[in-house]
Structure formats: C-alpha cells, structure tokens
Amino acid sequence: MARKSFKEQVLLAREEAIVVAVNRLLAEKGFDAMTVDAVAAEVGIAKASLYKHFSSKEELAAAAMIRVLDRALVKIEALRADTGADVVDQLKAVTRWTLQVQLAGEMPSLPAQNSALRTALMGNKVYLDRLLQVSERLGEWITAGQASGRLNPKLPAEAILYTMFARACDPVLSVMKASANFSDDEVVEILLSTCFDGLQGRGPAAAR
Amino acid sequence: MARKSFKEQVLLAREEAIVVAVNRLLAEKGFDAMTVDAVAAEVGIAKASLYKHFSSKEELAAAAMIRVLDRALVKIEALRADTGADVVDQLKAVTRWTLQVQLAGEMPSLPAQNSALRTALMGNKVYLDRLLQVSERLGEWITAGQASGRLNPKLPAEAILYTMFARACDPVLSVMKASANFSDDEVVEILLSTCFDGLQGRGPAAAR
DNA sequence: GTCTATAAGAGGATAGAC
DNA sequence: GTCTATCCTCTTATAGAC
C-alpha cells in the first residue's frame, strides 16, 4: 500500500472521527432520532463540512455499519486462528462480543423498515461486501455445527444466522441493564443462554 | 354497564377506526416513520379531527399499544381456562399468538429509546395497568414453569418475561418471511423453536 | 366534531465567501 | 475543506368558520 501523504492522513483521521461519532449516536438514539446537526456538534465541525465527506445521512449510517462489520471480521478472524476450538464455542464467542459492543454503547442500530436507508444500503457495494463476508464466515461455522449435531440440525441455517444478527441489537439487553439488578457480565451470560440454550434450557428434560 | 347513547356509539366506533389505522401503520412503518397525516388519510377524516380525539401522536401510539395488550389479555384468559395444560405450553401458545399477530401486520412496534414517547407511555395509567396485568399473568406461568423445571430455573424470571416481549416484535420474523423460502406456519414454528429450545436445540446433547 | 388553512419548528441539504 | 447563513420540505399541532 502506498504511503499516505500528510493531508490524506488528516483527512482520514477526520473521517474516522465522524464515523465514530455517528456510530455512538446511532447506538444511543437510532437512525431516525439521530440528527446530522448532532453529528456535526459531536465532531466539532460545521454541518456543511460533513457533507464534503459524506453525501447524505444514509451514507453516514452506512459508514458506521461498515465499521462495525469490519470490527466483527477482525474478531472472527482472531477466532478462526484457534483451529482446535468447537465451532459452537466460536459462534458463542462472536455473539458474546456483539453483546459486549452493545453494552459499551457502540452497536449502531438501524430501523428494520426505513425504505430510504434500506435503498442506500442495498446500493452500497462496500457494505454489501462486508455483510456477505461476515455471513459467509458465520455460515461455515453454522453448517459445521449442524453437521456435528451441536447446533439444531432441524433449523434452517439462515434462521440461525438471522437470529445471531438480531441478538446483536436485541432490546432485551438494554432493558435488563436498566433493571439494574445484574452486572454487565451477568446480563451477557443470561442473553447468551437464552439464545443458545433457549428459555427451557438444556438441563434434564422433563417428561412429556 | 350503562347503555350507550347513539352518539356515544358513533364516537366510539370512530375512535376504534382511528386506533385500528394507527395500529396498522405502527406495524408497517414504526412510530417515527408514521405521520399523523397518514393516519388521517387512512381513516378518511381531517387531521384536525384526529386531535379532537387524541391530543398527540404519542397518545395515538399509546392507544394502539393498549389495544394490543387488551387483545393479549383476552388470549391469555382463554388459555387460563384450560387449567389442565402445561404452563410452558401456555407460554408457547402466547408467543405463537404474538408471532401470528406480527405476521398479520398487526403488531405495533415502538422504538426502544424515543424519549418523548417513553415519557408519554410512562405517564399513561391505562397503558401501565394493561402492561402490568399481562406481566403478572405471564409471570405466574413463568415462575410455575421454573419451579417444575420445564423452564430454565437458572434464568431470572424477568429475563424470560422480557425475552417473550421482545420476540413479539423480533425483526427475524420479517426477514425470514422476506426470504420467501418458508410458509407462515413454518416461520412461526422456527422462531418458537429458537426461542424456547435455543439454537443448540434440546436433542441428544453432544459430548463436551 | 368536522372541515380548510396555516402557524411553528425541526431537520436535511446547499450556496457562496474564504 | 471549512465556515456562516439560508433554503426548502416535511410534520406536528392549532385557529377559526360551520
């Protein structure tokens, strides 16, 4: 990779600061409630300057999503290095990581049905590429887990993948944290258990 | 209960029509994307007339939430009549019902963090009363299920309750439906399984 | 209580100087 | 590329006639 000039480095640093702010606001308020004014204020620059870097609010959100997917890929690659580990433990580790990011207030959350945002994301090559990479890495573990019987083979693999994505922004976490009866670690382990073991648990099954 | 006059009946019918429209729009677009103009258009009356019945957009949302909680209470009471049934089966039946309501496009969904809305709901006695009633009914089944070991006794009862509420508006359902590889009934049973049995399933546990 | 018309303000995006 | 100032649209809510 070519050495970056000083100006380019400054530019990238600024854009990184913008994306970090967007990421935090997206985690705190969600896409609709986040205003571009608030982003500009948090970064400490004028709103017009933001639009020199990103052409729309949707582009800002896309950049934040790409950033968190990149962070996920780094985490996944680190786990892949441990070739001896059980694939279900790897999947649990990824889910635990997403819960911890959520607890840290760093998991951007987008509405499921905003059409303008949806359109922008579906037209964003980089976002789609990262999403596909994460899906493929997890998909390999999921199919392996189902083949070994450690993941429920009766479930469609897509259902397991979508469920993991959904747990990364599960509102149960913030409600549990707000109830203030549990430590962060306890909340994470409770959610992990409900996700992988279910509400019935895997203990001694009662007679039917 | 006192007999209603004709004018009162017309009034109530109109308000019911408004709440039905709000409910549908809330399910389709969510609170932020729903506009009061759209509600008025769907009901077929002027926007100013809406404000004679409900004093704010937040009140409209609260009315829709109260309505769905009332529907839930009717469902729960019907299930309670079956005193011989297993409590876990009752809880599954309630969850199945919420998934079907969601599939029918009739489950209003509110943002988790909208502060104006949150404030209005927390100040709405009727809403809080209905929410408490549903929580109490489900709470009885949950504690009974944990006592019998058919629900995981290691989980806090609140965690089970919150998880059931969260599954009532789980985005996984709409994504699975959009993937178009499954019938509505299949989607419902898949989500029920992931919720109660977990991703690992309750089949023959693999050796650790 | 229903309507038409409009106030009041928030928020996304841009113009143009530097 | 950064700023200030502004545009313009959308949306909530209300005024006032009937």
Image (spheres, coloured by chain):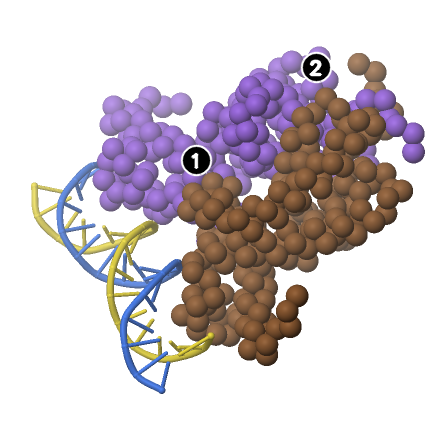
Chain colours: A brown, B purple, C blue, D yellow
- Measuring 86% from the left and 47% from the top, which residue is drawn there? A82
- Nearer to us of marks 1 and 2 is 1
Quadrant in which residue B208 is drawn: top right
Q: Secondary structure at mark 2?
A: loop
Name the chain letter of the residue that bears numbered label 1. Answer: B
Query: For this view, does B7 lie left or right of residue A181?
Result: left
- Seen in the picture, residue B82 relative to A199 is either above or below; the reply is above
Quadrant in which residue B160 is drawn: top right
Query: For this view, does A34 lie left or right of residue A132?
Result: left
Say which residue label 2 marks.
Answer: B85
The tag on residue B28 is 1
Q: Amino acid at mark 2?
A: Ala
Residue B57: horizontal and vertical position, in percent? Answer: 38, 46
Q: Amino acid at mark 1?
A: Glu
* Residue A33 seen in render: no
- Measuring 49% from the left and 71% from the top, which residue is drawn there? A41
- Seen in the picture, residue A60 relative to B22 is either above or below; the reply is below
Near-viewer residue (B41 or A66): A66
Which residue ends up furthest to the front in the rendered image? A2
Residue A164: horizontal and vertical position, in percent? Answer: 68, 39
Between discs 1 and 2, the one toward the N terminus: 1
Query: For this view, does B63 lie left or right of residue B7?
Result: right
